[in-house]
Image (cartoon, grey):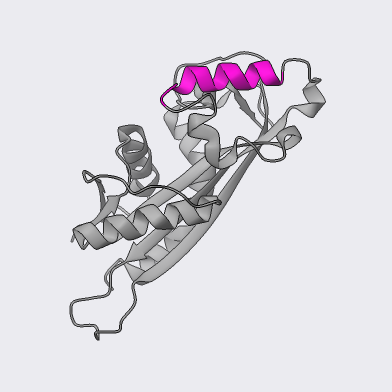
Amino acid sequence: MSVRIVLATHNQHKVDEFQKILGARLPELEIVRYDRPEPVEDGVTFAANALIKARAAAAQTGLPALADDSGLCVDVLGGAPGIFSARWAGHGKGDVANRDLLLDQLADLHDEDRGAAFACTIALVVPSGEHAGPDAEPIELVATGLWRGSLARSSRGANGFGYDPIFVPEGLSVTAAELTAEEKNARSHRALAFENLIPLLRMSVIPN
């Protein structure tokens, strides 16, 4: 029996990535893209923003909802860009502008000072069931994942998006954008977050 979960994003890259990550472990789940207006993300942490989106999607669709908030956290910048990763160069500037600005800001740093991590928080919100009492609250669960690495000096690879072309995962010499989808999905910050969330998905969403 298929279980539909809405993913609170308009980004088809994320829908595809979530489906691939979940497919092998939870084949009964069908990830559905959210087609309603997205709420304002005015939280100051990844968890707060993920919950804002998941709550809105669950309330508007009546389906269990997943949402993630993720970003690149650079050590010498005190964790920035962080929650501002998608708009580091300004609203609407896009991935290339974000990467170019960050590389320019770090251009003079030695290799050992270019440490960074991709961070991901995934929120799951399950609406209260139709037979629940009037005061029943939705189930809200949060899981996190951290993918350590460092920043390259130029973009390499065409298999990723966002900051993937300048992020070199710990223990590797290639960027995240030079990994295959299968390699990335096996080790990424989102995959690590899902490892922590999967038992909770089984408990709260998958029928016994």
Question: Could you tell me if residue 195 is visible in this image?
Answer: no
Q: Is residue 142 above or below residue 188?
A: below
The quarter of the picture where the C terminus appears is bottom left
* Residue at figure coordinates x 43%, y 30% from the top left: 181
Apparent side of residue 84 relative to residue 200 in the rendered image (left or right): right
Q: Nearer the viewer, residue 32 or 180?
A: 32
Percent position of residue 21, x then y: 40, 44
Percent position of residue 67, x then y: 38, 51
Percent position of residue 10, x then y: 29, 38
Magenta stretch, main secondary structure class: helix
* Residue at figure coordinates x 27%, y 74% from the top left: 128
Quarter of image, res 12: top left
* Residue at figure coordinates x 37%, y 66% from the top left: 202
Q: Nearer the viewer, residue 152 or 103?
A: 103
Please check the rendered image and state whether residue 99 is part of the magenta-colored stretch, yes or no: yes
Apparent side of residue 46 relative to residue 64 in the rendered image (left or right): right
Please check the rendered image and state whether residue 47 is part of the magenta-colored stretch, yes or no: no
Q: Nearer the viewer, residue 42 or 160?
A: 42
Question: Could you tell me if residue 180 is visible in this image?
Answer: yes
* Residue at figure coordinates x 55%, y 14% from the top left: 156
The quarter of the picture where the N terminus appears is bottom left
Which stretch did the figure color magenta? 92-106
Q: Is residue 48 above or below residue 90?
A: below
Apparent side of residue 187 relative to residue 55 in the rendered image (left or right): right
Percent position of residue 97, x then y: 51, 18
Q: Is residue 25 above or below residue 90?
A: below
